[in-house]
């Protein structure tokens, strides 16, 4: 099975096909010039039996998927859109742990470019100076009650300029180039992200979720802060006291109760 079997050609050497990763993550790499969504493409590969560690990376996505059915802006020549196939032996309700593992890996790597200004925002945003630089979308297929595969999809804004963002995201989003003032090599970044994610995934498999949670909380700007979480028509407010072993956000609310939050958009309350 190769890229041609799926009717898509490799993109040229001067683009992303210089990626060599080659470790556990990136043992085989599918480079696509254009795709609907790397998550969809990787799911098809996984359904066809591709093993853990195979990755898909595209120069542009026509239907980049964001969380909560949103669209992920995915123009060509600028960013990284990649999806990783995983087949961990865990039960489905632990799958959100992989989203947090990916967040830690991206935050660690981006900190090399922007030391001291990287934060994780629950559940899956990586921010530089409070602006979103990366989103993570984890999807899975369950077979007879067990995980068949998980797809961890990451969209990382590398060389987007402010004016490239759709107006509604211009203030809330950023890119590595905007933050560092330098053009960043996507090939170099992609090689590093597969290695860094591979290292954290290995930690997760060997030692479980505890070291991931610890590191995640270290990067999180919301621990002990008062926040509100909006999800559909619901709003929850409270002080963040942590995340549980299922990746749920734990809020201590005005009624002195601990609430588990499973989805939503977080914002800080007031000036803190
Ligand atoms: C979010 O809403 O924050 C998650 C965005 C995830 C985007 C990435 S880009 C690569 C992969 N393929 C997709 O269609 N989505 C994810």
Image (cartoon, grey):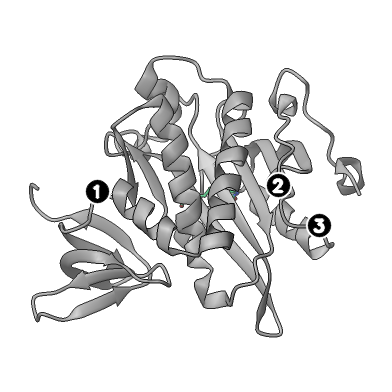
Image point (90%, 41%), residue name: 4
Against 113, is 46 above or below? below
Mark nearer the N terminus (2 vs 3) = 2
Q: Is residue 75 visible?
A: no
Instruction: Between residue 67 and residue 260, name the one nearer to us.
Output: 260
Q: Is residue 13 left or right of residue 84?
A: right
Question: Is residue 59 left or right of 95 when viewed as pictured?
Answer: right
- Residue depicted at x 68% and y 46%: 25
Mark with earlier residue (1, 3) = 3
Quarter holding residue 123: bottom left
Q: Which mark is residue 24?
A: 2
Q: Residues within 10 Å of mark 1 (few under 14, many from 20)?
A: some
Q: Position of residue 205 (x, y in %)?
A: 58, 61
Query: Crowding at label 3, few (<14), some or many (≥20) Cα neighbours within 10 Å?
Result: some
Determine the CA span between mark 1 and mark 3: 37 Å
Query: Would you place residue 160 above or below residue 58 in this image?
Result: above
Return the x and y of residue 57 as percentages of the image width and height.
Answer: 68, 39
Q: Which residue is mark 1?
A: 221
Element on which disc 2 rests: loop
Residue 220 location, x and y as percent?
29, 50
Helix, strand or loop under label 3: loop
Q: CA distance from mark 2 to mark 3?
A: 13 Å
Viewer-side residue, 125 vs 200 = 200
Neighbour tally class for label 2: few under 14, some 14-19, many 20 plus, Cα within 10 Å: some
Direction front: furthest residue: 207
Residue at numbered disc 3: 50
Choose the circle earlier in sequence order: 2 or 1: 2
Which mark's residue is nearer the viewer, 2 or 1? 2
Q: Secondary structure at mark 1?
A: loop
Residue 45: where, in percent of width, then height? 79, 56
């Amino acid at each position: 099975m190769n890229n041609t079997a799926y009717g898509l050609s490799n993109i040229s050497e001067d683009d992303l096909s210089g990626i060599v990763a080659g470790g556990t993550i990136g043992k085989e790499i599918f480079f696509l010039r254009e795709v609907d969504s790397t998550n969809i493409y990787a799911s098809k590969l996984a359904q066809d039996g591709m093993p853990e560690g195979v990755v898909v990376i595209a120069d542009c996505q026509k239907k980049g998927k964001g969380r909560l059915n949103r669209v992920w802006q995915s123009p060509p020549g600028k960013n990284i859109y990649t999806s990783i196939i995983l087949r961990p032996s865990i039960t489905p309700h632990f799958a959100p742990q992989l989203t947090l593992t990916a967040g830690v890996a991206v935050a660690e790597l981006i900190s090399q470019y922007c030391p001291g200004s990287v934060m994780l925002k629950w559940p899956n945003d990586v921010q530089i100076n409070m602006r979103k630089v990366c989103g993570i979308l984890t999807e899975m297929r369950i077979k007879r009650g067990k995980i068949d595969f998980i797809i961890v999809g990451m969209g990382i804004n590398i060389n987007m300029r402010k004016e490239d963002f759709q107006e509604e995201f211009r203030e809330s989003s950023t890119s590595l180039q905007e933050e560092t003032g330098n053009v960043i090599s996507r090939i170099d970044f992609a090689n590093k992200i597969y290695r860094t994610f591979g290292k954290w995934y290995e930690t997760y498999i060997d030692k479980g979720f505890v070291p991931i949670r610890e590191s995640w909380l270290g990067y999180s700007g919301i621990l002990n802060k008062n926040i509100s979480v909006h999800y559909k028509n619901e709003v929850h407010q409270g002080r963040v006291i942590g995340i549980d072993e299922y990746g749920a956000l734990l809020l201590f609310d005005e009624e002195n109760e601990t609430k588990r939050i499973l989805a939503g958009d977080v914002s800080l309350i007031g000036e803190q």
